[in-house]
Image (tube, rainbow, N blue to C red):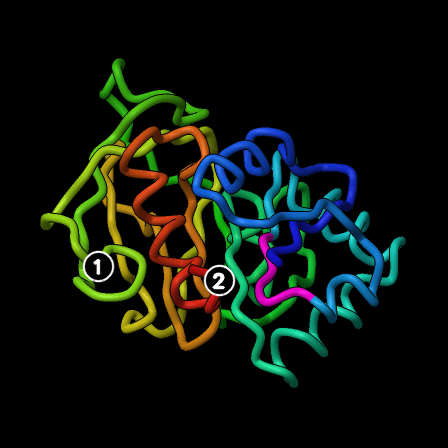
Amino acid sequence: MIAIIDYGMGNVRSVLNACESLGVTTEVTSDPERLAAANGLILPGVGAFPDGMKALRERDLVRVLNREVIECRKPVLGICLGMQMFASQGTEHGDHEGLGWIKGVVTLMDVPAGLPDVRLPHIGWNTVHFTKSDGMYAGTSKEADFYFVHSYVLVPDDPTVVSGECEHGARFVASVQHENIWATQFHPEKSHKNGLALLGNWFKSAGVC
């Protein structure tokens, strides 16, 4: 079973639909016992970094997630805001502590002046160039299109965790992969066949298919 973490800010319905379309048993929950019973965890997210972290803390999920992901090394997939909250720190509306699973800082995207077609938020389809050919991008070509909705990006301290990069005025990190921790800035659940392929690879890593 895969648990989609319910903390009041994730786009859980589309994630649930994508999982179920691949025949994977999925449950939306914030119950610590159900999270512990799951083969893998998905942390989706739509909204601001400080609001997301506040919602996790109010539900006492930070402690639970640290136990499952860091101590038990359970496979976890972060999506959009979920990926950003994996960082050490977020700078949206001030400085805020993240989960700290991927050392780095979430900052506003660097959009150079003088590019009228490059705006924030970054919304729509864009090409991700893979820097790792295994794991989340196994069985695919060197690049593929995915759907984005965001203004902030994760800048990791260790560049070797980066698995995909994209450009929107400037190059930014589109995905990271480090041991049991995978995350995407884009929305695989809204990215049609490319997103489903990525989810399928993650399910395999979690041992559910």
Q: Is residue 177 magenta?
A: no
Q: CA distance from mark 1 to mark 2?
A: 16 Å
Toward the viewer: 97 or 7? 7
Q: Magenta segment range?
A: 38-42
Q: Residue placed farthest to the left in the image?
A: 142
Quarter holding the N terminus is bottom right
- Identity of the residue drawn at 48% across and 44% down: 23
Chain-order first, disc 1 or disc 2:
1
- Report the magenta stretch's main SS: strand
Given residues 150 and 205, the one toward you in this image is 205
Task: Find residue 188 and report its image quarter.
Answer: top left
Give the residue number, with chain letter if any, for mark 2. 208
Q: Which one is in front in this view, the residue at disc 1 or the one at disc 2?
A: 2
Q: Dot 1 lies on which element?
A: loop
Query: SS at mark 2?
Result: loop
User: Residue 209 location, x and y as percent?
Assistant: 42, 59
Residue 83, compared with residue 168, is above or below; it is: below
Q: Residue furthest top?
A: 116
Q: Residues within 10 Å of mark 1 (few under 14, many from 20)?
A: some
- Is-magenta flag for residue 39? yes
| Displayed quadrant of residue 161 | bottom left
Which residue was labeled with disc 1?
Answer: 138
Point out residue 171 in the picture as x, y percentages from the top left corner. 24, 45
